[in-house]
Every structure is written in C-alpha cells, then in structure tokens.
Image (cartoon, helix red, strand yellow):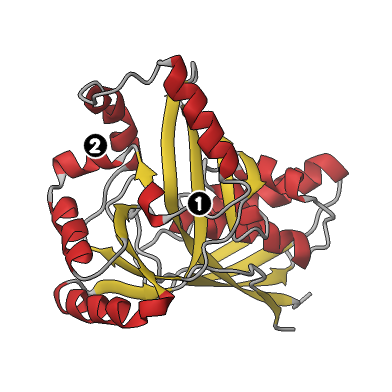
Amino acid sequence: MGESLQIFAPAKINLYLKVKGRRPDGYHELVTLMQKISLQDEIILERCASGIHLSCPDSDLPENRENIVFKAAELFLGDVQSRKSITLGGVKLKLYKTIPQAAGLGGGSSDAGCVLRSLNTLFDAGYNDEDLAGLGVKLGADVPLFTNGWPCALARGIGEILQPAPTLKEYLLVVVNQGFSVSTQWVFQNFSLTNSERNYNLNSSQNRENGKSFEKNLLQRLITPQELENDLELVTEKAHPEITDLKNQMLDLGAENAMMSGSGPTVFGLFSKVDSKAAHVCYSVLKKEFRKTYLLEPIHCFDTMEKLG
C-alpha cells in the first residue's frame, strides 16, 4: 500500500468534426480528428486499503459518484473484480482542475480516461488499449481518446473507434474560453434542426465519397488550417454569436484559421511557429478581455505518468 502516481490529463481540440447521422440508441455517429494540447489537469492517485476517496481542492466539483473521475475508478475496480475475480483494494484521488468545464475541450473525459489508464498501471492489472477503450466508452464518447498514448487520433462511431493520426506540428495555439458553458446534449439535440438550413445534402453519395476520401487522408498527412471544419459550430454560434466575433478577432490578429472546439464554446486559433510573434500578440490582446486565454502547443508525446512512491 502507499504506491502513488501523479498524472497530467490533457485537454483536446477538435480539428475536424463531422456528424454522419443518428443511431437508434440516440447517439450520433461522428468522424472527428482530435489533438491533445498542453492545457492539463493534475491528478494524484494513491492505493489504499478499500473504497474510492476523491477530493477536488479549490473546485466546486462533486467528490462522489456524480464526478466522472469517481465513476472511472469505480468502473475499473469493479471490472477487474468481475473479470479476474481479484479485489484490488481502494484508491485515493486528488484532482486539481485547470481545464475549463463544459467548454468543448474534453476536460472531464480526459480526467476519466487518464485515470483508467493510470489505475491499470498503479494496480498492474494487465489491460490493453482495447480493454481500456471499452471501459472508457461506457463513461463518454471522448473518453477512449485519453485511455491511449496517441497525441492525435481520428475517431469514428460515437468516438470509440480510434486510429492514430499525424500530430499537428509547426503551430502554436491561442485558446480562449469566454467564461460561459454549453451543454453538449443541447448542441446535439439541436443539430438536426440547424443542419436543415445548410446548403448541401448530407445524403448525397458524392459528398459521402468525397468525405471518406478526405478522412482517410487525415490518417496519412497533417490537416491544414484551411481544412478545419466543425459541424457543431453552426448550432452553438446561432445561440452565441460572440463565438463568431471571437473567431473574426483571432483572424484579424493573424491566425491562419480559427474554429470552435467540439460542442463549444471554446475557440482556438492556429498560428505558424515561423511567425510566433503573431500568436504572442493575439494572446496578449485577448488575455486582457478574457481571463481563460491560453497560449499552448499541440502535444507530440503523451506519457504523463510519474511515480511518486
């Protein structure tokens, strides 16, 4: 007893997000390119005799089963007991939040996925990436991304079918959360209504084939700033036009492109490292207006666990 791990759970941005349809169970089929970024939560895990004990210092997050981190620990320990007939004992978790909540950055999903991955290490349970992803999808569509070590991945299905993709390089990110939250459930519920206003037919066979070809290419090459696309933007921007204003402000400040991440409302701008001055100027300008403004980099290597004792 007493062995512990310190981990850093990264946020993600969606560089590409297409909604392909709705499944009978109510979930939406997606194709999305997700890049982990250098905005991170810190979590400390420590083995104990029994139970799950979660604390979230300096946060109003729940410290019980309402918290996805608690759910992840409960799911993992229960699965090991069920699958291997082994009682592992308990775990103490301390979560220090930095990633904004309900922001389209996958903070809760990252915390849960990284906890699953770390518990596997802490208890030497022998689960592989497929096992961990299978547990992760029970907690949420984005969770499987964070149960493996890929810095960037193309996800299909509801997010559980993952393939590694080239990591975004040679760019800096200015990431801005304007301080309000957006419900992912609300965005998806309103997607079909908003989508009917678009000028193309999602069911067009030509569109489908072109889309498949482009998405396949994303597994072999880096996406370019001009290819950023997010189907959910139109929904969230309609309710929050300040997102459009922020994107335009980033473009005016030199971003090669700017887009909302996930279901929003966080917006990010891509800046070439060749001209890093523009990124720093944009960050300085927006930081004066929005407290949650960050100058970040894409993660190129994802190995965030450190043994403490």
Question: Compared to 144, does 214 lie above or below?
Answer: above
Whole-percent x, y for residue 74 in the image: 63, 50
Whole-percent x, y for residue 87 in the image: 81, 53
Whole-percent x, y for residue 115 in the image: 62, 60
Q: Is residue 159 visible?
A: no
Name the residue carrying label 2. 235
Q: Residues within 10 Å of mark 1 (few under 14, many from 20)?
A: many
Q: Nearer the viewer, residue 149 or 221?
A: 221
Residue 34's tag is 1
Q: Residue at x 58, y 68 (%)?
A: 93
Q: Is residue 250 visible?
A: yes
In the structure shown, which secondary structural element does the residue marked by tag 1 occupy? strand
Q: Nearer the viewer, residue 221 or 145?
A: 221
Task: Report whether 42 appears left or right of 200.
Answer: right
Indicate the quadrant containing the C terminus: top left, top right, bottom left or bottom right. bottom right
Q: Residue at x 17, y 58 (%)?
A: 248
